[in-house]
Image (cartoon, coloured by chain):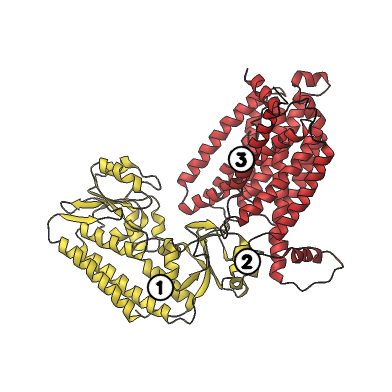
Chain colours: A yellow, B red
């Protein structure tokens, strides 16, 4: 574990070093998650974010004054109520379809898009004269980079470094705690009565691994429904369900098929309230806290922070 | 004229006077064998492999007077609570869709008519979406919402089209198409304003499938589907008369308006219940009636029960594939029905044309 933590720290120092080097110049340039060179002449006074996680990042960086636009579904920021409250006061720029007109009317200097879901919006936003930065949400590392790069572009690098530093520290401590486990629990994670689950290649999948859980359907790609028989076959020790889509613990306990599963027989069904679930889902600054929360809940052990 | 052209097309696909068509007895015997085999396949094949012998033991185990054979209880759950209700639900849904499709094609004399032509599926989707967006989450909220949506859609279509106790098929189809668009737009709007998780729920439902099957659902479905189909069967002679055209039917002493109203009402009711139970599953209601008509000819007295069996059998087999083809992930069954239904249909169509039985 020592080795792992030092690797992480060295990685962090390297990232900070590179960023620090560039920051000596007046003009700021970063390469975003789409591999685009993003150059900013001066610190942007008006910033628009289009997904919940980057809204959270921007607010956590202290950009409250400069943040002028946020996505519609800001209720998913309920896991940090004070930030949600701030975000609710901003102009809404759309949900899964962004309103270009609305964004243009806010006259932003910087628009932060999501690299995977909003790739096709990049040129449209550039057309209205704003600088576009595409935020990464692939894994924890790309989230760390995103935080540093947004911090750098907006002149909040110090705060970004502090946030990422804490994230790395907490992640190291969490990994140490996970390494001390006798055995990782085999887990079925579901978001609906349809038995939709996630693969390891999703952001939630990453968070589950981080929390020391073995996803029994790790091999699938993205979000997919599975047959109840498959769950009986995998026989997980633990079921984690999210209540967001109206799933209740009763539904799982009373499911004819699931009563054959170890997790239900031993009463190991955990229902995550919306906020705790968003913490695992949102590729923002709270992802490690979300994983720690889950770890402590499941294994009844505290992470040494 | 539009109607005339469509009628010609229907008869191109199903010539009224085909001399060497399959004998009904042979076809029905084949269908029953296929059904029995579908039960075996459906019970024995699934993600968890249970040997056929054991599956049968478990089935016989539940019969009275037989001793408990000491098989693992999870095998029993899988076979009794997961596979069996799913096979039976598949049978009812497939049969209802195929019977309803046959009725729609017969009444509208249009080969493109499907069970969903009067807006049942889009009404069902809109109903389901409304329930989700309003925040109802109980187990039966979605099917009930879908049922209400489906029934309101067709009620509106009927109310608009019917005047003084009768209507033209033309008006009904147009009203159905227009209302379907309206309800689809409503569904899209609801998905648009819904939260991301609500969007998922609506989309899962719209994909359709038999995953919701349970004994409870089967018990609700059984009386409606069987009584509905039973009455339709009893009216098959009138449907035959109607296929000759409304004025011809009247000469034969059939009241076209009454027949249309009754049969469309029943066909819609069984479709609406299927939609509520399994979402909208495409192709069964379009292709199975045609396949049966190609094999057996257009006499509805034979065609309707054959379509019922054929639709049920088809859906059971395709659902087994949906469950197993991409393990551990479950495919939407509608993808499989289209994948197998469409090529088979094209093959039969080609064979008919090349066979030169019609010009």
Q: Secondary structure at mark 1?
A: helix
Q: Assign the N terminus of chain A to one quadrant of the image.
A: bottom left
Q: Quadrant of residue A293?
A: bottom left
Q: Which mark is residue A292?
A: 1
Q: Earlier in the sequence, mark 2 or mark 1?
A: 2
Q: Is residue B173 visible?
A: yes
Do tags 2 and 3 sit on the same chain? Answer: no
Q: What percent of the width, then of the height, locates residue B157? A: 63, 31
Q: Quadrant of residue A59?
A: bottom left
B240 in relation to B289, above or below: above
Which residue occupies 57% across, 47% down?
B207
Question: With B202 as the anchor, is A137 left or right in this view?
Answer: left
Q: Quadrant of residue B8?
A: top right
Q: Which residue is mark 3?
A: B121
A158 in relation to B195, above or below: below
Q: Which residue is mark 2?
A: A258
Q: For label 3, count other residues whose C-alpha is less than 10 Å away and answer few (under 14), some (14-19) or many (20+).
A: many
Give me the chain letter of mark 3: B
Q: Nearer the viewer, residue A175 or A242?
A: A175
Q: For label 1, count other residues whose C-alpha is less than 10 Å away and answer few (under 14), some (14-19) or many (20+).
A: many
Q: Assign the C terminus of chain A to one quadrant of the image.
A: bottom left
A228 in relation to A44, above or below: below
Question: With B221 as the anchor, is A298 left or right in this view?
Answer: left
Q: Are marks 2 and 1 in contact (CB under 8 Å)?
A: no
Q: Secondary structure at mark 3?
A: helix
Q: Nearer the viewer, residue B171 or B101?
A: B101
Give me the chain letter of mark 2: A
Tell me how far mark 3 sits from mark 1, CA to CA: 45 Å
Which residue occupies 31% across, 72% down?
A168
């Amino acid at each position: 574990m020592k080795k792992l933590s030092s690797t992480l720290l060295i990685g962090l120092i390297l990232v900070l070093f590179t960023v620090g080097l560039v920051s000596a110049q007046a003009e700021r340039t970063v390469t975003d998650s789409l591999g685009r060179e993003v150059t900013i002449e001066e610190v942007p006074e008006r910033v628009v974010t289009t997904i919940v996680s980057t809204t959270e990042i921007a607010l956590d960086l202290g950009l409250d004054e400069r943040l002028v636009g946020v996505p519609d579904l800001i209720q998913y920021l309920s896991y940090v109520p004070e930030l949600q409250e701030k975000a609710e006061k901003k102009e809404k720029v759309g949900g899964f379809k962004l309103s270009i007109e609305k964004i243009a009317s806010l006259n932003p200097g910087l628009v932060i898009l999501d690299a995977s879901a909003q790739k096709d919006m990049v040129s449209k936003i550039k057309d209205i004269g704003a600088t576009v930065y595409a935020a990464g949400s692939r894994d924890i590392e790309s989230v760390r980079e995103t935080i540093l790069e947004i911090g750098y572009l907006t002149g909040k690098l110090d705060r970004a470094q502090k946030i990422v530093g804490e994230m790395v520290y907490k992640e190291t401590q969490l990994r140490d705690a996970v390494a001390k486990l006798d055995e990782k629990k085999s887990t079925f994670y579901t978001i609906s009565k349809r038995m939709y689950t996630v693969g390891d290649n999703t952001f939630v999948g990453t968070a589950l691994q981080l929390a020391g859980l073995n996803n029994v359907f790790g091999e699938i790609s993205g979000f997919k429904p599975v047959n109840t028989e498959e769950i009986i076959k995998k026989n997980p020790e633990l079921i984690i369900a999210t209540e967001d889509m109206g799933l209740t613990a009763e539904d799982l306990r009373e499911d004819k098929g699931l009563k054959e599963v170890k997790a239900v027989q031993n009463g190991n069904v955990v229902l995550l309230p919306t906020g705790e679930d968003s913490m695992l889902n949102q590729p923002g600054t709270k992802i490690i806290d979300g994983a720690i929360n889950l770890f402590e809940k499941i294994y009844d052990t505290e992470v040494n922070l | 004229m539009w109607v005339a052209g469509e009628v010609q097309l229907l008869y191109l696909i199903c010539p009224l006077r085909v001399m060497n068509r399959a004998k009904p007895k042979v076809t029905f015997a084949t269908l029953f064998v296929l059904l029995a085999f579908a039960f075996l396949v459906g019970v024995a094949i699934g993600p968890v492999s249970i040997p056929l012998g054991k599956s049968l033991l478990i089935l016989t185990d539940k019969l009275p007077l037989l001793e408990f054979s000491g098989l693992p209880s999870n095998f029993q759950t899988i076979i009794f609570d997961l596979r069996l209700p799913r096979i039976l639900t598949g049978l009812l849904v497939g049969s209802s869709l195929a019977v309803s499709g046959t009725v729609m094609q017969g009444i509208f004399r249009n080969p493109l008519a499907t069970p969903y032509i009067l807006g049942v599926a889009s009404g069902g989707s809109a109903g389901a979406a409304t329930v989700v967006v309003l925040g109802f989450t109980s187990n039966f909220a979605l099917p009930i919402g879908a049922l209400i949506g489906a029934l309101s859609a067709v009620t509106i279509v009927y109310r608009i089209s019917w005047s003084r106790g009768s209507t033209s098929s033309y008006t009904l189809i147009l009203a159905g198409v227009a209302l379907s668009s309206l309800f689809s737009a409503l569904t899209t709007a609801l998905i648009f304003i819904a939260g991301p998780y609500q969007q998922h729920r609506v989309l899962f439902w719209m994909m359709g499938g038999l995953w919701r099957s349970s004994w409870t659902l089967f018990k609700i479905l059984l009386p409606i589907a069987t009584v509905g189909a039973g009455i339709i069967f009893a009216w098959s002679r009138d449907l035959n008369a109607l296929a000759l055209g409304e004025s011809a039917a009247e000469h034969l002493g059939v009241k076209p308006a009454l027949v249309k109203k009754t049969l469309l009402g029943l066909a819609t009711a069984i479709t609406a219940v299927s939609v509520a139970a399994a979402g909208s599953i495409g192709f069964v209601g379009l292709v199975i009636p045609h396949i049966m008509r190609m094999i057996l000819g257009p006499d509805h007295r034979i065609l309707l029960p054959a379509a019922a069996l054929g639709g049920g059998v088809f859906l059971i087999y395709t659902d087994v594939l949906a469950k197993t083809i991409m393990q551990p992930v479950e495919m939407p069954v509608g993808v499989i029905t289209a994948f197998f239904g469409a090529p088979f249909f094209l093959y039969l169509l080609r064979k008919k044309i090349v066979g030169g039985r019609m010009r």
